[in-house]
Image (cartoon, rainbow, N blue to C red):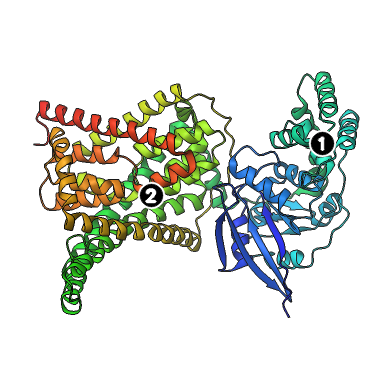
């Protein structure tokens, strides 16, 4: 008989240490993603059984320390302190043990039931690193399990350790005398519970942790006495208490590592030497920028733009849907649906199937799929953190740091997903700046693929479009950074080694994102088709298009372009698909294509992205962004049209 109450297990650790791979192995396919209560941060939950006992596994966002800097780290802290976990598995990168043991000691000090999981042991061993697991377990006083999630080595031992967890006698790591005296005094004054031991609460207060400071200031009766203890010690140490604690803790970690880690002589494999060399040149501007240009050219322009948006879209749309599937649907609707209104809704000009499903499947999905393949490949090789380091100096001018390259790059796949990922940025200012740049200057993969496919026949207009997008990105980013108050946060990021990508991992990641995207866009496309059908039947659509047509004429576009821009409001990629139909029909000159491409690229975010923006940034900020974006997009299109007309280009 399976026991009713599930044992709660929380996986914690820094980004890029393999938490998700371990989570997937332990839980299999049963995974649920939900928001942590009161936040917009996603957490993954799964289950497994061991014998008669059920286990609930929670995969948390990456965290470097118990002192949170981002919204995601704050949620991980809340999960640890409020969820009453039965087991906490701290997953670390074995080869970076010295950097990651600090959080292990914090978890032990917090009185949490910890298992230390040394993951990525294969890479540590390839470096000649030998870790005495038994001695490390003895020094920490907690179970220590070595694994290699990629090779599935040690994962059953980890499952068994979780299932048979028994609290050992965790070590207490003493700091210097004055810190220990302050910890003792503060602990004696604390009366409230913060979901962790008084020792770690006192340490966090000394380090200036805002979450504990704010709570203690409101709940502790002896708060003024606690402040007096902190201020007294701070005065003696020139207000550098956080640094003092960090130095003391690092000394403890260095002693542990010196005892448990040895290095054996070994012969480097050819790929390891090559990977080290490539890892270095991808971070240096002189070599990294040309490499980035090659990645953009072959990854985005050739694979996504020409192959995905060109060959795949042409084949699926022109050779499968238009001549085969759509006629069959129309024939079936005519034969089996007696009502004219329902026939037109299913298989008419704005039909759910003939337009909505076709656009989503034949035009959008191939482009998004090829982009997510490229993104998963770059992610699995470890290139993205190096790209973040490469662009950090440039992003400083926009009030951002290199960490913002992850959501901005992901925005080339899906703007809605990218806005969610801006949670990883530390300050509200950076999140607002990144959201604005995503909404204005970063086209989604479907939109980008269609635009590149439409412009690729003329190198001049591709160059003008690319240069103008970069100009808008740089100028708007710099101006926004001047007007939005706040300062840029410090940049830090764990840099994993370059790895040969695993085909299985790349395909799984790409498939998961494609499935998420398709499930998100298909309902929107169907609803959009229904709205357009209703608007067409009632005449509202024609009136709306009539209102937009004068604006199209002002920027040199034909009246038919009004429909593409109207569709673009529902989804940017829907508008791009409408532009694709116009171009295929020969209704746009090169100059008009360039003007339309610039206007549509800079156009307001689609309904789905706007909804996420309102959820993440608030209604006022989101609507302000929309107004500014409309002004910039329309002004840019008018400028380009007049310049092209003056120079007689692309007529």
Label 1: which secondary element: helix
Q: Compared with residue 75, is residue 482 higher up or lower down, i.e. above or below?
A: above
Identify the secondary structure beneath mark 2: helix
Q: Residue at x 82, y 55 (%)?
A: 142
Which of the two residues, 97 or 353, is positioned nearer the viewer here?
A: 353
Q: Is residue 394 above or below residue 565?
A: above
Indicate which disc residue 202 carries: 1
Within-10-Å neighbours for mark 1: few <14, some 14–19, many 20+: many
Q: Number of labelled discs?
A: 2
550 with respect to 498 (left or right): left
- Can residue 320 be spotted in the picture? no
Residue 379 percent location from the top left of the image: 49, 50
Decide if residue 538 is on the left or right side of residue 172.
left
- Residue toward you, 631 or 141: 631
Q: Residue 45: x percent and y percent?
A: 61, 61
Horizontal arrangement in the rendering, residue 203 relative to residue 423 (left or right)? right
Residue 115 falls in which quadrant of the image?
bottom right
Q: Is residue 315 left or right of residue 398?
A: left
Quick check: marks 1 and 2 in contact, CB under 8 Å? no
The quarter of the rendered structure image containing the N terminus is: bottom right
Foreground of the two, 36 or 492 = 36
Residue 133 quadrant: bottom right
* Residue at the image point whose x is 61% and y is 65% from the top: 25
Residue 242 visible within the image: yes
**Badge 2: how crowded within 10 Å, few (<14), some, or many (20+)?**
some
If you read the primary sequence from the N terminus, does the residue marked by circle 1 or circle 2 appear first?
1
User: Which residue occupies 83% across, 57% down?
Assistant: 134
Q: Distance from label 1 to label 2 (Cα)?
A: 44 Å
Q: On the image, numbered disc 2 is attached to which residue?
A: 608
Eyeballing the image, is 37 above or below 503? above
């Amino acid at each position: 008989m399976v026991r009713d109450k599930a044992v709660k297990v929380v996986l914690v650790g820094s980004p890029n240490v393999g938490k998700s791979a371990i989570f997937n192995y332990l839980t299999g396919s049963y995974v649920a993603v939900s928001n942590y209560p009161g936040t917009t941060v996603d957490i993954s939950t799964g289950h497994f059984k061991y014998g008669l006992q059920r286990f609930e596994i929670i995969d948390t966002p990456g965290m470097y320390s118990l002192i949170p800097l981002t919204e995601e780290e704050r949620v991980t802290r809340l999960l640890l302190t409020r969820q009453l976990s039965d087991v906490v598995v701290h997953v670390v990168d074995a080869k970076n043990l010295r950097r990651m043991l600090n959080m292990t000691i914090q978890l032990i000090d917090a009185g949490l039931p910890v298992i230390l999981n040394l993951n990525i042991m294969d890479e540590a061993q390839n470096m000649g690193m030998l870790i005495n697991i038994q001695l490390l377990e003895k020094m920490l006083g907690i179970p220590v399990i070595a694994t290699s999630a990629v090779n599935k080595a040690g994962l059953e031992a980890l499952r068994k350790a979780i299932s048979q967890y028994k609290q050992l006698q965790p070590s207490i790591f003493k700091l210097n005398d004055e810190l220990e005296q302050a910890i003792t005094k503060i602990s004696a004054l604390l009366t409230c519970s913060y979901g962790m031991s008084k020792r770690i609460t006192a340490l966090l207060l000394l380090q200036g942790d805002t979450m504990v400071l704010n709570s203690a200031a409101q709940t502790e009766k002896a708060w003024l006495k606690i402040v007096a203890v902190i201020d007294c010690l701070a005065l003696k140490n020139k207000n550098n208490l956080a640094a003092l604690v960090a130095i003391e803790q690092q000394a403890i970690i260095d002693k542990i590592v010196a005892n448990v880690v040895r290095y054996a002589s070994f012969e480097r494999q050819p790929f390891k030497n090559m990977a080290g060399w490539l890892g270095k040149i991808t971070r240096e501007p002189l070599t990294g920028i040309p490499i980035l240009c090659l990645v953009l050219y072959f990854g985005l322009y050739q694979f996504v733009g020409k192959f995905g948006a060109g060959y795949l879209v042409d084949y699926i749309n022109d050779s499968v849907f238009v001549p085969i599937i759509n006629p069959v649907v129309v024939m079936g609707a005519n034969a089996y649906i007696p009502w004219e209104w329902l026939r037109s809704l299913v298989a008419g000009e704005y039909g759910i199937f003939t337009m909505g499903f076709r656009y989503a499947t034949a035009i959008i999905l191939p482009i998004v799929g090829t982009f997510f393949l490229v993104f998963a490949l770059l992610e699995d090789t470890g290139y993205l953190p190096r790209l973040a380091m490469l662009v950090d100096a440039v992003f400083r001018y926009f009030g951002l740091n290199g960490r913002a390259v992850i959501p901005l790059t992901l925005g080339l796949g899906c703007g809605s997903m990218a806005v969610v990922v801006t949670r990883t940025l530390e300050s509200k200012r950076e999140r607002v700046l990144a959201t604005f740049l995503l909404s204005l200057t970063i086209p989604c993969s479907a939109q980008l693929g269609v635009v590149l496919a439409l412009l690729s026949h003329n190198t001049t207009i591709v160059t003008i479009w690319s240069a103008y997008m970069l100009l808008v990105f740089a100028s708007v980013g710099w101006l926004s950074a001047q007007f939005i108050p706040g300062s840029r946060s410090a940049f830090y990021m764990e840099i994993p080694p370059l790895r040969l990508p695993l085909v299985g991992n790349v395909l799984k990641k790409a498939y998961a994102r494609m499935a998420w995207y398709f499930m998100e866009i298909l309902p929107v496309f169907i609803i959009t088709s229904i709205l357009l059908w209703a608007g067409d039947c009632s005449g509202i659509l024609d009136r709306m298009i009539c209102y937009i047509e004068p604006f199209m004429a002002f920027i040199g576009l034909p009246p038919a372009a009004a429909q593409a821009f109207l569709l673009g409001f529902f989804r940017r990629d829907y508008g791009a698909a409408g532009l694709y139909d116009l171009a295929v029909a020969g209704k746009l000159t090169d100059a008009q294509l360039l003007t339309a491409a610039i206007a549509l690229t800079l156009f307001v975010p689609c309904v789905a992205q706007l909804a996420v923006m309102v959820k993440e940034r608030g209604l006022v900020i989101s609507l302000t962004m929309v107004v500014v974006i409309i002004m910039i997009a329309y002004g840019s299109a008018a400028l380009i049209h007049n310049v092209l007309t003056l120079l007689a280009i692309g007529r």
